[in-house]
Image (spheres, helix red, strand yellow):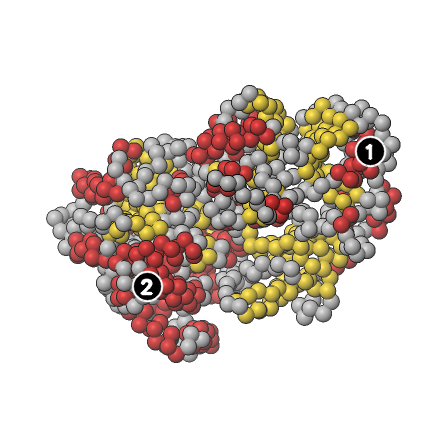
């Protein structure tokens, strides 16, 4: 029976990245994927003729430029296009546009509050400083703070040096920042509620926290620390949809001789004498390998595809209690034309970026209240993007598709399980809200794909449909991710590793988790490292 | 109202035939100049415009480019004597890229020759070439040339969706137009000439029409392009796209020979990697003897494509053969971070004898006003940084 060097479970972008780097190092690797298509949550799917949805993740800023460059992903078809001109909508229909020039942004903020227009400069500087620091940890393995191995000490010193370079005052601020709520953090800068609500909204995306929940300030940072071509905070679209990212990485993997097998769901990771030696597929096949890498989330890995008895004491419980709460839904809509929004000038720049329906801090908090009580928000926060306004390849000319990310939507409803009827009601709630800001919107709808946490878990395999493979709170970040003591991609079973977003640096289409895991695996196998460093250390 | 005289009229730049439409879209009032014309540096955002060229489509105003109509029984012979490439036997409705040199083999300019009839050509180039043309026709009897620069409105239309837009505009069979070929269409009562040419390395066309039809063409093109991401782009985006394609730019990669002050601070085609444009098999042409010598001796500097580590553009960087920067071997002519390739790219002139060894760039960059220096390793790249298949395919595949 053939024995691979490595089997990677799950052909999401991190699994593919991990496999590509192992293959590049000369290993014989196989990626197994339960679906008939690859990509996991970075996927493009044509569900309505002529329209290519990015079914799950829809924009990109975390993708490691160094990996894009190193794996030659452009050659494999990946082009990332930045998009501009998002508009935030307040409850009363007021709008806040994010213009690409400082001057225009300043003039607009002054209409709301001269104080806030001024304060924005300080806010951007502070956020950039935090971002630059945390960015430096992304393509590095977190050190184990309890270890005295030279490598851990070296990495701890690296981190300490970075923090120390902030200066004493900022160091205090940084520590506060990790535990604050987004709303409280913004109080220090802004007075206008729409400005605050707009700035706070990235703090709740993908997380089961509200704008007033401690920890949401870090989520805010997680969403703005990315960049497109060095422009921190900018977001990009993958030409051809997010699947173009996964497909390009798969192309690099195959170029280096790696294999991908689809329709190959894993039933169990095979373990003998405390060592992983392969996987058993759902169809009964067994595949053997020197090492097994799981790209599934920590909860799914340890509670679904491993035998409890194979695990050391405590791990099963840790995995069971791993915080991975579903909080968001996604509605993909094919439209017969470009929607127009009340109060937004109909010009080629502003009307074509994204829309965030933030309402106000209170509206967002009330939306969270619904989630706490096991209901989807009746007045949800929605972040929309119309990729087809930028990418000519994803919809027929003149027609569009709109990605709507919705907070909040629980994975379990108080009134019993999700049903197709409830799913459609959830969708109705969302399009009703959009219609309020865009009269006539509903008449444009040609097709809708409504995804609650239930669908996301069923299709992609993310537990509870949590987009980050686990909450990004301080207890589950850096050397605590997924569990304290297991943050270096090696799992409690020998020859077994994790490479998904449940590991450092967490959620987002970054390829960093997969690449970091590959670096550790190659170290264990005494192979030369093939994983590049990030390229912005002199920023 | 009393008409006041514009006291600065003499200093104001001329406006191109498309100016009224472009001015409305130039939200940043970012103008520079080209050959006396007011000319957009960018309209909205350089990177946005650059991505229109790579992702959808954009128009670039080439009215200020110099255009000369050259006619007569000796037109071909005269041009063939002037440029280094052999243009005899060129088919009608074809375009070819050429350069021309001084007697010393130093490059005066590069440009394109359009063969529009058996005895009718159009020469285009970046800088005025009138005086040189007048010299070049000396001794040729049946040749006439007219400066058409102001009499032709021209728009470069570049990007993956251009073919689809032109089809929507009603240009039948445009998808069958091959690179460097020309096709003529009737348009709103006038004649529209379309060549599949451009300066971006991507799929693209250039549209040529009489000035009175210019705004009509613009409006029709923008109406057709509305759903295909059409956007005007300026000099800044052009410069990004052409660098990725590996194309040279006057005042960046080469000094025009007739404007060069210092001895041999101008270039030969061989030094600019344009040896393929020089045809020694054809009859005598300007600079032939000097170029023969240059070929056998090899150029002192050779234009080289570099992939540079890190992400700091090596603008105006000096190149060395060692990391300690003790021996200077060349200089960077153009550099940028390539958003589409995700690489730190540059064109550089490097002393030919050092091309095989290590190349290091000494890069200076500002970090919140403080100048910082870094030395980065360079890798020579043979092929253009960006050369998508659609740029050559006929018909170009769906964007």
Q: CA distance from mark 2 to mark 1?
A: 69 Å
Residue B384 image point, x, y percent: 63, 46
Residue extending furthest toward the front: B2
Residue that label 2 marks:
A115
Q: Please tell me whether residue B82 is drawn above or below residue A33 in the rendered image.
A: above
Q: Which residue shows up at 64% across the image and 27% down it? A: B182
Residue that label 1 marks:
B137
Q: Please tell me whether residue B348 is drawn above or below residue B17 in the rendered image.
A: below
Crowd rating for badge 2 (residues with CA inside 10 Å; few <14, some 14–19, many 20+): some
Q: Please tell me whether residue A417 is drawn above or below residue B130 in the rendered image.
A: below
Disc 2: which chain?
Answer: A
Q: Nearer the viewer, residue B270 or A33?
A: B270
Q: Nearer the viewer, residue A188 or A156?
A: A188
Q: Tell me the element at label 2.
A: helix
Crowd rating for badge 1 (residues with CA inside 10 Å; few <14, some 14–19, many 20+): many
Q: Which residue shows up at 24% across the image and 55% down it? A: A360
Q: Quadrant of residue A337?
A: top left
Disc 1: which chain?
Answer: B
């Amino acid at each position: 029976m053939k024995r691979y060097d490595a089997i990677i479970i799950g052909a999401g972008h991190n699994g593919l990245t991990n496999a590509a780097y192992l293959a590049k190092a000369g290993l014989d690797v196989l990626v197994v994927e339960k679906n008939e298509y690859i990509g996991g949550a970075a996927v493009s799917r044509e569900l309505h003729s002529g329209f290519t949805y990015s079914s799950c993740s829809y924009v990109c800023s975390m993708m490691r430029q160094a990996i894009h460059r190193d794996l030659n992903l452009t050659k494999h078809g990946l082009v990332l296009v930045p998009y501009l001109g998002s508009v935030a909508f307040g409850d009363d229909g007021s709008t806040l546009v994010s213009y690409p020039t400082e001057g225009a942004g300043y003039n607009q903020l002054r209409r709301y509050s001269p104080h806030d227009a001024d304060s924005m400069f300080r806010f951007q500087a502070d956020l950039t400083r935090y971002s630059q620091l945390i960015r430096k940890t992304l393509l590095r393995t977190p050190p184990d703070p309890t270890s005295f191995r030279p490598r851990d000490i070296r990495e701890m010193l690296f981190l300490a040096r970075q923090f120390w370079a902030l200066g004493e005052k900022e160091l205090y601020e940084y520590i506060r920042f990790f535990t604050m709520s987004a709303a409280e953090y913004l109080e220090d800068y802004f007075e206008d509620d729409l400005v605050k609500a707009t700035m706070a909204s990235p703090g709740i995306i993908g997380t089961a926290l509200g704008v007033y929940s401690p920890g949401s300030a870090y989520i805010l940072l997680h969403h703005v620390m990315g960049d497109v071509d060095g422009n921190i905070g900018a977001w990009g679209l993958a030409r051809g949809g997010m699947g173009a990212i996964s497909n390009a990485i798969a192309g690099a993997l195959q170029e280096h001789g790696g294999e991908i097998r689809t329709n190959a769901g894993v039933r169990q990771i095979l373990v003998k004498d405390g060592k992983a030696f392969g996987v058993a597929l759902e169809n009964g096949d067994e595949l053997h390998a020197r090492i097994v890498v799981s790209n599934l989330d920590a909860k799914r890995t340890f509670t679904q595809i491993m035998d409890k008895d194979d695990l050391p004491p405590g791990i099963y419980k840790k995995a069971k209690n791993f915080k991975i709460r579903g909080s968001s839904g996604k509605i993909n809509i094919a439209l017969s034309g470009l929607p127009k929004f009340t109060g937004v000038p109909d010009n080629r720049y502003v009307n074509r970026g994204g829309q965030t329906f933030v309402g106000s801090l209170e509206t967002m908090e009330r939306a969270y209240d619904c989630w706490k009580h096991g209901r989807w928000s009746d007045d949800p926060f929605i972040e929309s993007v119309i990729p087809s306004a930028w990418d000519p390849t994803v919809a027929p000319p003149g027609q569009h598709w709109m990605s709507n990310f919705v907070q909040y939507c629980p994975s379990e409803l108080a009134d019993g399980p999700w049903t197709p009827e409830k799913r459609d009601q959830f969708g109705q709630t969302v399009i009703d809200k959009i219609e309020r800001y865009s009269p006539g919107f509903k008449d444009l709808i040609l097709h809708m794909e409504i995804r609650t946490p239930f669908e996301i878990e069923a299709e992609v395999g993310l537990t509870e449909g949590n987009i980050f493979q686990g909450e990004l709170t301080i207890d589950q970040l850096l050397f605590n991710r997924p569990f304290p003591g297991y943050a270096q991609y090696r799992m409690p079973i020998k020859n077994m590793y994790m490479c998904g977003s449940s590991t450092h640096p967490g959620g987002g289409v970054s390829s960093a988790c997969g690449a970091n895991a590959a670096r550790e695996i190659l170290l264990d196998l005494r192979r030369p490292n093939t994983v590049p460093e990030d390229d912005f250390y002199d920023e | 109202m009393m008409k006041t005289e514009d006291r600065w009229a003499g200093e104001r730049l001329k406006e191109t035939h498309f100016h009224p439409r472009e001015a409305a879209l130039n939200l940043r009032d970012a103008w520079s100049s080209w050959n006396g014309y007011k000319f957009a540096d960018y309209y909205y955002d350089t990177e946005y415009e650059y991505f229109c060229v790579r992702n959808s489509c954009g128009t670039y105003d080439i009215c200020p480019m110099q255009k000369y109509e050259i006619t007569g029984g000796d037109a071909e012979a005269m041009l063939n004597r002037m440029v280094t490439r052999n243009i005899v036997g060129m088919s009608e409705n074809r375009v070819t890229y050429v350069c021309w040199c001084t007697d010393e083999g130093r490059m005066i300019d590069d440009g394109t020759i359009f063969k529009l009839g058996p005895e009718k050509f159009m020469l285009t180039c970046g800088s005025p070439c009138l005086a040189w043309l007048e010299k070049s026709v000396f001794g040729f009897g049946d040749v006439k040339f007219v400066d058409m620069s102001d009499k032709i409105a021209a728009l470069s239309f570049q990007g993956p969706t251009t073919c689809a837009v032109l089809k929507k505009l009603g240009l039948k069979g445009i998808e069958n137009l091959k690179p460097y070929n020309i096709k003529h269409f009737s348009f709103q009562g006038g004649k529209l000439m379309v060549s599949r040419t451009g300066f971006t390395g991507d799929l693209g066309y250039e549209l040529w029409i009489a000035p009175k039809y210019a705004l009509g063409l613009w409006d029709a093109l923008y109406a057709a392009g509305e759903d295909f991401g059409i956007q005007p782009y300026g000099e800044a985006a052009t410069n990004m796209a052409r660098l990725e394609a590996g194309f040279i730019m006057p005042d960046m990669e080469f000094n025009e020979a007739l404007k060069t002050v210092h001895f041999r601070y101008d270039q030969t085609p061989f030094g600019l990697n344009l040896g393929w444009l020089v045809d020694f098999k054809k009859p005598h042409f300007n600079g032939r003897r000097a170029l023969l010598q240059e070929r056998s001796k090899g150029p002192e500097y050779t234009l080289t494509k570099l992939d540079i580590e890190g992400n700091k553009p090596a603008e105006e960087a000096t190149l060395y053969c060692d990391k300690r920067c003790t021996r200077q071997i060349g200089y960077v002519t153009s550099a940028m971070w390539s958003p589409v390739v995700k690489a730190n790219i540059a064109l550089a002139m490097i002393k030919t004898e050092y091309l095989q060894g290590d190349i290091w760039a000494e890069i200076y960059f500002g970090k919140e006003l403080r100048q910082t220096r870094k030395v980065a390793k360079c890798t020579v790249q043979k092929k253009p940084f960006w050369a998508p298949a659609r740029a050559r395919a006929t018909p170009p595949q769906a964007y």
